[in-house]
Amino acid sequence: MNVLVFGTFDHLHPGHLFLLNEAAKRGDLYVVVARDANVERFKGKKSDQPEDERVAAIQSKFPSATVLLGDADDFLAPVRSVKPDLILLGYDQKLPPGVSEENLMVPVERLPAFKPDVHKSSLRRRVSGNA
């Protein structure tokens, strides 16, 4: 079974690892990493790490995963390419503007939070002073 996750994955942390490990338990792991330009466009700020560093961090922790960069214009291109059997989302993960779960055309599951009071990316940025 092909399991697809996507996200920014800035400063890979235990919350990200929880998502990735849960996905890997369910099948062959495919990870789509958001493009730098899309991160800035949708989050209103640049990612702390460039896309190639974020890809390398995931490849280092999950060598058997297929790690792809997202498409700069067509958010559904990786979904069509991978043809996943399941898409897993983080507990608070938002889909790109104009994309709904129905557009994904495969089952979608949302995972529970993993210590969000400690590992949520925005909280970690505030604590480290990179807000």
Image (cartoon, rainbow, N blue to C red):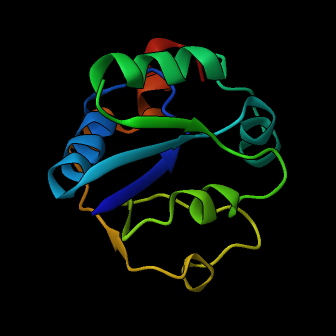
Visible in this render: residue 90? no
Residue 31 lies, with reference to residue 75, above or below; the image says above
Task: Say which quadrant the C terminus sits in.
Answer: top right
**In percent of the image, x 66 and y 17: which residue is there?**
50
**In percent of the image, x 62 and y 65: which residue is there?**
80
Name the foreground residue: 37 vs 115. 37
Q: Position of residue 78 (x, y in %)?
A: 62, 55
Furthest toward the left, the residue is: 25
**In percent of the image, x 18 and y 58: which residue is there?**
26
**In percent of the image, x 15 and y 51: which residue is there?**
25
The answer to which image quadrant residue 41 occupies is top right
Name the foreground residue: 117 vs 75. 75
Visible in this render: residue 74? yes
The answer to which image quadrant residue 92 occupies is bottom left
Residue 65 lies, with reference to residue 88, above or below; the image says above
In the drawing, does residue 82 fall left or right of residue 27? right
Residue 60 lies, with reference to residue 36, above or below; the image says above
In the drawing, does residue 19 fall left or right of residue 37? left
Name the foreground residue: 83 vs 103. 83
In the drawing, does residue 61 fall left or right of residue 34? left
Q: Position of residue 63 (x, y in %)?
A: 30, 24
The answer to which image quadrant residue 107 occupies is bottom left
Q: Position of residue 112 (x, y in %)?
A: 23, 61
Number of numbered discs visible in the structure rendering: 0
Q: Position of residue 1 (x, y in %)?
A: 27, 63
